[in-house]
Image: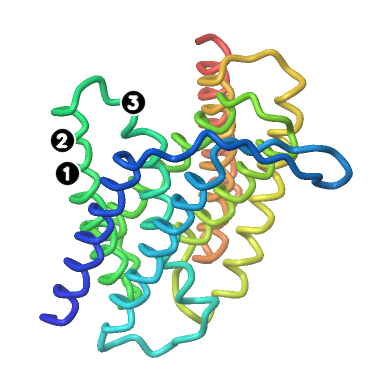
């Protein structure tokens, strides 16, 4: 475990240093325009976005290094290991989009420390789940669910609030929802193919719904909550199917929850 803690502490420390540099460095106000599927697409501050990608990649690589130290890790294929990278990577990308909203340096510093703590706990929770325990009271699983659903909700709101064209917003929601579902649905390595299939179905569904929402004048919070509701129900049903517990009663329960939540969201 000593090697695990050393690697984990190193990953978190380097990430916090990278996040600090991200907000300290002055990136040039460059605008890049390129054609995507026959139509122009503008990207502001491409170097800043490159830094975001590098930070996310750093955390994902570090998480992989931590997971590989687990003595009970029997499967080392990429399809399975990749499901452990998702939440730490998305957490850091989310931090780059939210920490800058802090009203004062003190609050920003507190936010940075909070990111470090959440990141440490998230990677440790992923590490402990290599034993494939599926007990709802098992804290790593509970922590993973809280972080995963929280990240998905915030990303859905942020992406929709950008009011980007459907090609960008729908693709963004599809990617975030799909990879987050991968992490939340991960059970035993023997089920990894089904996990990828269900995550792909959830991703495509979210992308199509986002495309439709872009034609509807709706507040970003309501749109984000609607996307989250679909995501939550889809992931929940897929989990029950993977566990072999999907039944008519389960469908009725999720349907009732969905209708009640939909009524609340539409009346906000």
On screen, residue 115 above or below 123: above
Q: Residues within 10 Å of mark 3 (few under 14, many from 20)?
A: few
Question: Image check: 72 left or right of 53?
Answer: left
Q: CA distance from mark 1 to mark 2?
A: 5 Å
Question: 56 or 266: nearer the eye?
Answer: 56
Is disc 3 placed on a helix, strand or loop?
helix
Q: Which residue occupies 26% across, 84% down?
A: 69
Say which label, 3 or 1, has the lower sequence index: 3
Q: Which residue occupies 54% across, 65% down?
A: 242
Question: 38 or 127: nearer the eye?
Answer: 38
Question: Image check: 253 left or right of 96?
Answer: right
Q: Residue 113 — which label?
A: 1
Q: CA distance from mark 3 to mark 1?
A: 15 Å
On screen, residue 55 above or below 28: below
Residue named by callout 3: 101
Say which label, 2 or 3, has the lower sequence index: 3
Residue 129: which quarter of the image? bottom left
**Do the CB atoms of the residues marked 2 and 3 lie less than 8 Å apart?**
no
Residue named by callout 2: 110
Q: Residues within 10 Å of mark 1 (few under 14, many from 20)?
A: few
């Amino acid at each position: 475990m000593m090697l695990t803690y050393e690697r984990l502490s190193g990953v978190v420390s380097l990430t916090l240093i990278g996040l600090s540099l991200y907000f300290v460095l002055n990136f040039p106000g460059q605008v890049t325009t390129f054609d995507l599927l026959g139509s122009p697409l503008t990207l502001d501050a491409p170097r800043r976005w490159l830094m975001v990608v590098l930070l996310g990649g750093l955390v994902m690589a570090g998480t992989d290094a931590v997971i590989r130290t687990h003595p009970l890790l029997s499967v080392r294929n990429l399809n399975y290991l990749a499901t452990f990278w998702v939440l730490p990577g998305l957490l850091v990308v989310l931090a780059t989009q939210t920490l800058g909203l802090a009203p004062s340096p003190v609050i920003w510093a507190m936010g940075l420390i909070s990111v470090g703590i959440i990141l440490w706990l998230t990677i440790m929770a992923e590490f402990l789940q290599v034993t494939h325990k599926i007990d709802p009271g098992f804290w790593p699983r509970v922590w993973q669910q809280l972080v995963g659903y929280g990240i998905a909700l915030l990303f859905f709101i942020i992406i929709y609030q950008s009011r980007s064209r459907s090609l960008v917003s729908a693709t963004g929601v599809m990617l975030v929802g799909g990879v987050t579902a991968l992490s939340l649905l991960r059970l035993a390595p023997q089920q990894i193919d089904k996990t990828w299939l269900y995550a792909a179905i959830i991703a495509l569904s979210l992308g199509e719904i986002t495309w439709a929402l872009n034609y509807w004048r709706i507040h970003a919070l309501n749109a984000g909550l609607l996307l989250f509701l679909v995501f939550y129900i889809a992931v929940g049903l897929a989990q029950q199917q993977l566990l072999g517990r999907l039944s008519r009663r389960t469908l009725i329960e999720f349907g009732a929850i969905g209708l009640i939540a939909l009524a609340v969201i539409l009346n906000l």
